[in-house]
Amino acid sequence: MDKHTLFYAMFIPSLILFLLGMGFRIGLYLQGTVKGAENATSWQKLWVLLRRGWRGFWKRPIWYLQITITDVLFHRKLYGQSFYRWLAHSFLVFGFVATFIVDMIKGLTTGYLVEWSHSLPFLSFAHAFETGAIRPFLDFFLEFFSFLILVGCVMALIRRFILRPPQLKTEEEDITSLCFILFLELSGFFIEGYRIAHPEVVANRVYMANFTPPSANNWLSFGGYSISIFLRGVTINPDFLWYFHVIPSLLFFIYIPHSKLLHLFTSSVTVIGDRMREREKQQLMDYKKS
Amino acid sequence: MKLSRLTPRQILEIDACTRCGECLRYCPIYIEREEEAINPRGKIQAIKRFIRSQYGIWAKIFGPKKLSEDQLKKFSEMVYRCTLCGECGMVCPVSIHSKELWIGLREVLVELGYYPKEFDTLKKNVLTEHNISGLDNEGRIEWLEAMGDLPEHRYQKEKAEVIYFVGCVASYFPMVHKIPQGMVHIMRRAQVDFALLGGAEWCCGFPLIGAGMRKEAEEMMAHNLEVVRKKGAHTAIFTCPSCFHTWKEEYHSEINLFHFTQFLLSLIQEGKISFKEERVKVTYHDPCDLGRASGLYDPPRAILRAMPGVELVEMKDHGPYCKCCGGGGNLEMIDPELSAALAREKIKQIQETGAEVVVTSCQQCIRTIMTTARRMKIPIKALNLTELVLKHMK
């Protein structure tokens, strides 16, 4: 089967399940009463809230972007409470966001644009992402940001199981989430190591996790490169390796709406909503003072 | 269990809780009892389990599980064992507005009929007599009788620019009558044109809102707003932080609202109040509804700084981190022992400062602290800021 077809045959159902999960959660939130739309149906409530959010955003888009960066992505409040927690959390959040962006760039350019460039010549710039000047940066940053996630995950595990602050309570959900992240990161580094150690796998294009030919700058993928030293004499079915990483990744994706990882979305809403309220209160006080 | 008593944001907040436990380090109830069931995290986890059993995927497929009476009773105990001090929400890393959430959950429980029965008396008193004590509402200004040299109108004028909203506790509990009396003295000496509402003043609605009976509080709010407007007042002053906070958050009026600490500070700045020097070492207790709920930490401290000879020593936990005295959230009605335990902790912190007097800006805090101190035979002195100002005024 074509590599794209195989991937999308798994990804699209996963995306549908993820969206259904998110829809289920949103449907639950809409059971609540919206001020000013007390008798509305769930769809009407959703419309009212989206419209309010949209209008609110365009009243001060810069402020919203600033809050999203400082208070959501870089969690300013947590920084004031515990530097250790803030660092671990920032590594995880920033690592995930950055890895996702770099991975999307890499996937789009090397997986699609290069192929399309054969019939659409203006897309030939994409070759720079595959074998040209940009490729080493992609390799390095993908590795670096994934490494940040790994460090964040290990820090969280140390805090939870070794430092054990008294207020922390570990439940199955916490262990499942951390194990998922740890597994995805370690398996990712392992696969990268195997790819570097076995260039013939990529050359034969049986190793579907990587759409690109072997990089000339393998050492830039510092994590995978270190692992590759130990994998040169080891032979594993590359298809198995791919499924070994991709299937848990998709399961993780489906699991998000039903796990504590949902807070990626929900806490973003609560934090932005809170700062908005604080700002409105402050404006009202300033107005009354004046 | 219907979720319509909550807002979409509140239901979403339940999912936003990561169980990090930051709130536990600050929750006075948890510090005292160390029970997971009555701490903020425990409450959120319990409601999450309820929601799952009623609205989760399995509930959608196999139908919702019936909630047992025992489960609901236990949950009610969890939700009502709280002073609504709001410290958990203030420190929450994901900014869950927990105080509003607890009130929302109380509304859900009231709808289900699972709330402490003591609240039926409270509800009856407020709805029939329009005050929390259950006494005749015309007796609201009996504390005036003890004041000599009253003008003929006894401050119940037809029209006035400023209304002094006294509140139920200061009106009906003799232990704190000195607060409205002091406030009247100060305003008279500062030549403020003000009026009292007398029997026309009704409970502000705060105790009912805190009990989860917001609907019943609406009648109180509408009435109070109407009588203040009829007087032609543009300003209302409050000595009770809870009345002040309720007016500010719930009444949505055009009237300028001031807690007395803000009002007195402006009188000091205008030179209408000046002080004589008198040496005294004090500590200041921030009432929850004035500090965390209304963000007023500076005005009372600025007044203390303006008084020559007054030395302010802060408690270990002060300002936004000031611990509740135990008098909030109607806790005293439900679990007096727990409320007293919090007051004991507060007294300990007061004593650690070595201050001669603990000053606060709330009648309920004075009542809670002094009642416990007397029971424990601890000779501490608690004064409302109005009393201290009056004592030091030239």
Image: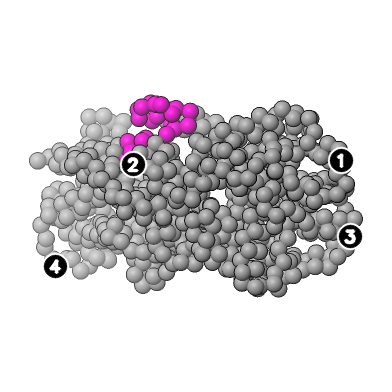
State whether discs 2 and 3 lie on one chain: yes
Could you tell me which chain the residue with mark 4 belongs to? A
Q: In the rendered structure, which amino acid carries the disc numbered 2?
A: Met
Disc 2: which chain?
Answer: B
> Which element is circle 1 on?
loop
Image x and y of residue A235, in percent = 11, 63
Q: Which residue is mark 1?
A: B151
In this picture, residue A86 sits left or right of residue A18? right
Marks 4 and 1 on same chain: no
Q: Which of the chains bears the disc numbered 1?
A: B
At 17% from the left edge and 48% from the top edge, which residue is drawn? A208
Q: Is residue A239 left or right of residue B318?
A: left
User: Toward the viewer: A176 or A58?
Assistant: A176
Q: Amino acid at mark 1?
A: Pro
* Callout 3 secondary element: loop
B315, above or below B265, in the image: below
Q: How many neighbours does mark 1 have within 10 angstroms: few (below 14), some (14-19), or many (20 or more)? A: few
Q: Residue at x 61, y 72 (%)?
A: B376
Which color scheme is applied? one colour
Same chain under badges 2 and 4? The reply is no
The x and y percentages for residue B338 are: 50, 63
Q: Are marks 3 and 4 in contact (CB under 8 Å)?
A: no
Mark earlier in primary sequence (2, 1): 2
Which chain is home to disc 3? B
Kindly tell me whether residue B259 is visible in this rendering: no
| Residue A27 sits inside the magenta stretch | yes
Displayed quadrant of residue B205:
top right
Give the residue at x 42% y 43%. Answer: B110
Can you tell which mark lies on residue B1?
Answer: 2
Which is closer to the viewer, label 3 or label 1?
Answer: 1
Q: Secondary structure at mark 4?
A: loop
Residue A233, label in figure: 4
